[in-house]
């Protein structure tokens, strides 16, 4: 499955969508943004070092025609300006450029003009790998360090708007652990048991939650069968709920570096979609992530129309 083509096909006729980029002076960021602008997916506002943005664009022949640039060399102030553009409805989407995630999130979580809601924010990765004809979601590999069971519940809930925008109805959520049996010494297995019970009791809606699952038992029907797993959703996961940030981050990097997978990444749970990829990610990953954020914004607009 080609992730980028799938995202392109699901985006409706191009609407006016404005993307604000914080600390935009980065080759891969500018490449992705100018591609999205040239293909009329977005108009863009780049916040950052204007001279460096223009120098990078000149070196790599990126067209800045029609793109607004706000010159701000301080990364903290650049993040604040970009967030305020979204808060003031001058932009629809926010994107992280070449800046630490923590710096951007401080601006996003500002109580006066940030994009916080009453819900936890979490990072969601949509990915495909060449050997499997299916999309997967994975969360959380970039924000929540060691989520407790309540945080994991909200992380699951933050995945539902993403699956819905992608056309995955009633997704199967696998709570990933090291084993498939409840072990009182392994907190992730206890969380899995509780999360599954919460979903079956109606406290988590819009999905099916099962676990504990080891990774192979979550994604491979053959592995699940070989292990003698009786859960009907074994091997059929759409969403992989990771136990902590280390596990999520390692899986994310393994997808991109070992499996040659394609990724698209957003922060869900905020007042607007936020494109947030690793600073080392390719321009393709950043472009995919812009497409995903557009799709989420369009789907939210349809839901609230």
Image (spheres, rainbow, N blue to C red):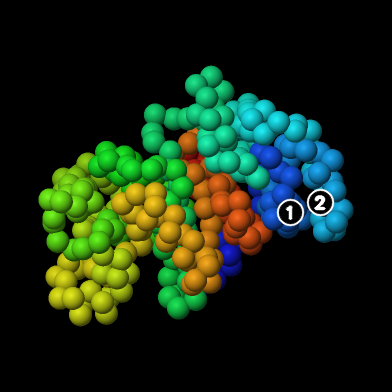
Q: Which residue is under mark 1?
A: 27
The residue nearer to you, when weighing 47 against 248, is: 248
Residue 41 x/y as whole percent: 68, 52
Residue 159: tell me if it is visible: no
Per the rendering, the mark at residue 56 is 2
Residue 256 x/y as whole percent: 52, 65
Q: Report the side of 262 relative to 178 (left or right).
A: right
Q: Look at 17% across and 66% down and name the residue there.
A: 231
The residue nearer to you, when weighing 302 against 278, is: 278
Q: Please say if 261 is above or below 105.
A: below
Q: Look at 19% across and 52% down and name the residue there.
A: 186
Q: Report the side of 267 relative to 149 (left or right).
A: right
Residue 117 x/y as whole percent: 44, 30
Q: Please say if 191 is above or below 86.
A: below
Q: Report the side of 305 relative to 156 (left or right).
A: right
- Secondary structure of the residue carrying tag 1 is helix
């Amino acid at each position: 499955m080609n992730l980028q083509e799938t995202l392109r096909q699901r985006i409706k006729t191009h609407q006016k969508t404005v993307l604000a980029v914080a600390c935009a002076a980065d080759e891969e960021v500018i490449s992705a943004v100018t591609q999205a602008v040239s293909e009329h997916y977005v108009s863009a506002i780049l916040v950052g070092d204007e001279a460096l943005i223009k120098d990078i664009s000149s070196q790599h022949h990126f067209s800045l025609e029609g793109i607004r640039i706000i010159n701000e060399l301080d990364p903290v102030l650049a993040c604040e300006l970009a967030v305020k553009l979204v808060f003031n409805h001058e932009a629809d989407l926010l994107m992280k450029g070449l800046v630490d995630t923590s710096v951007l999130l401080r601006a996003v979580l500002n109580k006066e003009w940030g994009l916080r809601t009453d819900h936890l924010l979490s990072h969601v990765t949509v990915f495909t790998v060449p050997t499997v004809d299916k999309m997967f979601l994975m969360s959380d590999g970039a924000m929540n360090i060691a989520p407790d069971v309540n945080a994991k519940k909200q992380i699951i809930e933050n995945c539902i708007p993403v699956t819905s925008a992608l056309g995955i109805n009633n997704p199967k959520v696998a709570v990933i652990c090291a084993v498939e049996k409840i072990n009182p010494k392994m907190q992730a297995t206890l969380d899995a048991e509780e999360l599954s019970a919460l979903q079956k009791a109606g406290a988590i809606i819009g999905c099916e939650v099962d676990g504990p699952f080891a990774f192979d038992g979550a994604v491979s029907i053959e592995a699940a069968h070989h292990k003698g797993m009786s859960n009907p959703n074994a091997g059929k996961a759409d969403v992989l709920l990771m136990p902590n940030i280390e596990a999520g981050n390692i899986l994310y990097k393994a997808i991109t570096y070992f499996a040659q997978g394609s990724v698209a990444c957003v922060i869900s749970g905020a007042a607007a979609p936020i494109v947030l990829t690793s600073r080392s990610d390719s321009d393709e990953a950043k472009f995919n992530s812009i497409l995903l954020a557009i799709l989420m914004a369009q789907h939210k607009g349809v839901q609230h129309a």
